[in-house]
Image (cartoon, rainbow, N blue to C red):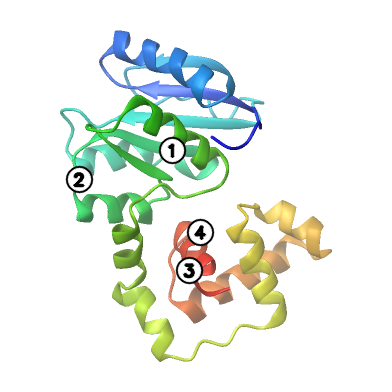
Amino acid sequence: MNSDTTYKVMLHIVGENRLQNELMAFFLEKEARLISCCNIHRDMPSDINSSSAEKHLILLDCISAEFPEIFARLAPNHFRCFSALFNAVPDETFEKQALTRGVRGVFYRTESPQTFADGIYAILNNELRYSPKVLSSFISEKHIGNLLENNVRLTRTEREVLSLIADDMKNPDISEKLFISIHTVKTHVSRIYKKIGLQNRSEAIVWAKRHL
């Protein structure tokens, strides 16, 4: 890792293997430079919305789970925190589904501990942790690929809003940054999604990083 930044994170590791997960938490605190309060769960945590932690990082074990079940478990919380999947098997369809649902990264069962730690650090640094092949394929999907044929034209303010979304800023932060109301921000976001053909913030981030 090249940066000395330390992240204050509430770490949630979800899975059945408690020993593995406790060892992982200890390792990540050291190698991914996390100052964390770690919670080990057998199911998704329910107290995220009420917590005052700066950031939450949910790591969900994919062992012995089908991907519809995995995404159903993530659904209540993934828009309010960082999330990643580990112990996954390489599968382009699975990874594109994860990307569409706002999951920041997928880690394979064959990856080394240090690669895992580096990937977690990248996610906390607002990066997406997927293979170039998956990102390229995702971007070229019909609902995104059509935008190049449709000659999409965004206004200056829409481009500013989209750029801030790509920096992982939420609507209240964008409102304060651009000196506009939250209602106006939501209107711009809705128009951006409609013009480009996107469905959520994760797709907007991927598109912005490629085209802005």
Residue type pointed to by label 3: Trp
Is 31 on the left or on the right of 4, as rendered? left
* Residue at image mark 4: 201
Few, some or many residues within 10 Å of mark 2 (<14, 14–19, 20+): few
Foreground: disc 3 or disc 2: 2
Considering only order in the chain, which callout, 1 or 4, is on the residue closer to the N terminus? 1
Where disc 1 sits, the SS reads helix
Residue placed furthest toward the top? 19
The picture places residue 116, in percent across and down from the top left corner, at 38, 31
Considering only order in the chain, which callout, 1 or 3, is on the residue closer to the N terminus? 1
Mark 1–mark 2 CB contact (< 8 Å): no
* Residue at image mark 2: 90
* Residue at image mark 1: 119
* Residue at image mark 3: 207
Task: Tell me the CA gap for discs 4 and 3.
Answer: 10 Å
Residue type pointed to by label 2: Pro
Where disc 3 sits, the SS reads helix
Mark 4–mark 1 CB contact (< 8 Å): no
Q: Quadrant of residue 156?
A: bottom right
Task: Tell me the CA gap for discs 1 and 2.
Answer: 16 Å
Residue type pointed to by label 4: Arg
Considering only order in the chain, which callout, 3 or 4, is on the residue closer to the N terminus? 4
